[in-house]
Amino acid sequence: MPEFLRALRHPQFRTFFIGQLCGAMGSWVQLVAMGWLTYRITGSVFMLGVVGFAGQIALFFLAPVGGMLADRFDRRRMMMINQVLVACQALALALLTYTDTIEAWHLVALSLILGAFYAFDAPIRQAVPIQLVRDGRDLPNAIALVAITTNTARLVGPSVGGVLVALVGEAGCFMVNGAAYLMTFLSISVLRLAPAPARVNDSPLQAIGAGMAYAADTPTIRLMLLFSAAVAFFATAYLTLMPYFTREVYGAGPELLGLLLGAAGMGSLAGSFYLATWNSLHRLPRSVAIAVAVAGAALACFPLTAAPAAGAAVLVMVGFGVVFCAGGANTLLQHLVREDMRGRVMSLFVMCYYGVMPLGSLATGTLAELFGAKSTLVVFGVITALVAALMYRTARRLNWREAAT
């Protein structure tokens, strides 16, 4: 087996990996169908934004609750319950669409519900890989391979979703997602996970507060969470403005939009594969900072490109740096955190990275409306590079070799 796939030598992780790939593909198929259905029944680009925001914002508010539950209850059982709930959400969408009773408020409400399920599920999934690989040296590779499932689905899923919308309609796509998550359920059901340590005497709020205090008091964890939030806010919001640049700057249509997003996805996949080859944790923080600095510089250059090919090349670099940051931060946090705090700290990572993304998107849209899309992305790119430089300088003074105690 190739070295960059070495974590797949562990049977439990291999099963988990296959299940996650099924779920990620199903999610992208549903995402495409959801967007198409939203625009078909509303004809509103504003509603596209509302539905997208509704599906993500719960990660910011509810992820800490999911982390607290991950440190108190059986993680395997909780993941199994979540997969069933996600499948039920998809089947509810399919039923409403098939019977032609779907309305805009259904889409918003079901997106909020799905976001809540993801908020509870994501911290648990982040905390699981370390229990599935027997050799701790394979942990960075395992985390990178999980990221590869997401980025592979990001590249392939929209195309598959578009074809399925044409062949079987939106309702059929939702049923495909429901079936995909039942496959994920089956893969999780055969895993053997150690019970998570729990402090049952703490109230839920006390447990969440203890996790936040632990993260704030541990310099390396605190730095990675703050850095992840900054990257998520400034370096990922460009996706919101891609339709504008496609139409108004390059004078093209949805085909070019797909190519530009595909270029960013190719960079993301390359970043995941590069992380999969990594085996030096103590050099990882500074390498992450360098990758993000390059991504920030590329982001600042993107609005200045006159040709679509140049813009696509720049977006490859942005995608690479952003995903290498997310995977690197995940790897470092898994290495540093205490086992009894793992779920709560990883929930803070979910909140700081994935939960901050929709806030960055809102800020980007607002600032672009006020000051122009080009100026907004240039400023965001420069800020990203400056934050990365500060991260590099700070990381040199910290001890990344030992796990926090």
Image (cartoon, rainbow, N blue to C red):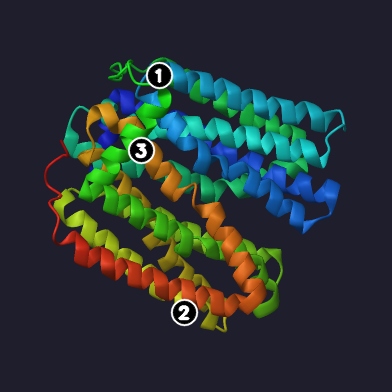
Q: Earlier in the sequence, mark 1 or mark 2?
A: 1
Looking at the image, which residue is at 70% across and 73% down?
247
Q: Earlier in the sequence, mark 3 or mark 1?
A: 1
Judged from the image, the secondary structure of the residue bearing numbered disc 3 is helix
Q: Is residue 258 above or below residue 134?
A: below
Neighbour tally class for label 2: few under 14, some 14-19, many 20 plus, Cα within 10 Å: some
Which quarter of the picture shows residue 245? bottom right
**Residue 301, label in figure:** 2
Asked if one can make out residue 250 in the rendered structure from this viewpoint, the answer is no
Q: Count the marks: how many?
A: 3
For the C terminus, which image quadrant?
A: top left
Which quarter of the picture shows residue 136? top left
Rendered location of residue 353, percent (x, y) = 43, 50
Labels 2 and 3 touching (C-beta < 8 A): no
Amino acid type at image mark 2: Cys
For the N terminus, which image quadrant?
A: top left
Residue pointed to by mark 3: 346
Neighbour tally class for label 3: few under 14, some 14-19, many 20 plus, Cα within 10 Å: many
In this rendering, position of residue 87 left or right of residue 208:
right
Q: Nearer the viewer, mark 3 or mark 1?
A: 3
Amino acid type at image mark 3: Met
Residue found at the far right of this picture: 100
Asked if one can make out residue 196 in the rendered structure from this viewpoint, the answer is yes
Neighbour tally class for label 1: few under 14, some 14-19, many 20 plus, Cα within 10 Å: many
Rendered location of residue 108, percent (x, y) = 72, 40
Amino acid type at image mark 1: Arg
Residue pointed to by mark 1: 76
Judged from the image, the secondary structure of the residue bearing numbered disc 1 is helix
Looking at the image, which residue is at 50% across and 25% down?
184
Looking at the image, which residue is at 39% across and 61% down?
320
The CA span between labels 1 and 2 is 45 Å
